[in-house]
Image: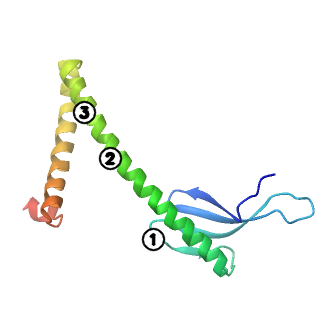
Amino acid sequence: MTDLPDYYFRIRENGAAVFRIDTANRQRRIEMDQIAVVNVKTGDIRPHGGRTLSQADLQAIGDWLARRQDLLAARETDDILRLADQMNQVAHWVQSKATEAQVAAVSDALLLAMHDLRGVLVRKQAGRPDAPEAEAG
């Protein structure tokens, strides 16, 4: 059997459940003991079941949390770049393949979304705070 890590992180929607891996038992079975829950957005680490986390536990969880936050940020950027590619494909589809009925079916939703995105991008690049309430009046 290959060397197993000391910890396993079961990914959840906003973070992970953290398990300590133990193979030092008589049957050489893999035992997973949940020790904590981590929230990736807030960085909150909550011990599980009244446990006290050791410095090694906290260090391992902190290291995983930093790597996970970096990974999610990179994925978010990649998703946005993919969206730009999709917008280019939509433009090509509208220009070359779409029927009038198809264009009519998607135009309002696309134009409103693009208008909203353009406004947010312009404000952000100009360094202005995003203040939709001020624009509504």
Which residue does the numbered mark 2 point to in the structure image?
80
Q: Quadrant of residue 32?
A: bottom right
Query: Residue 101 versus residue 5: which sits nearer the camera?
Result: 5
Q: Quadrant of residue 63?
A: bottom right
SS category of the residue bearing label 1 = loop
Q: Amino acid at mark 1?
A: Thr
**Badge 2: residue crowd in 10 Å (few <14, some 14–19, many ≥20):** few
Q: Amino acid at mark 2?
A: Ile
Query: Residue 67 versus residue 111: which sits nearer the camera?
Result: 67
Q: Say whether disc 2 or disc 1 marks the residue closer to the N-terminus.
A: 1
Residue plotted at (18% across, 60% down) = 124
Contact? badges 1 and 3 (CB < 8 Å): no
Which residue does the numbered mark 1 point to in the structure image?
42
SS category of the residue bearing label 2 = helix
Q: Quadrant of the C terminus?
A: bottom left
Q: Residue furthest left?
A: 137
Relative to 8, residue 45 above or below = below
Which residue does the numbered mark 3 point to in the structure image?
88
Q: Say whether disc 1 or disc 3 marks the residue closer to the N-terminus.
A: 1
Q: Position of residue 128 (x, y in %)?
A: 13, 66
Q: Quadrant of residue 99?
A: top left
Q: Amino acid at mark 3?
A: Asn
**Badge 1: residue crowd in 10 Å (few <14, some 14–19, many ≥20):** few
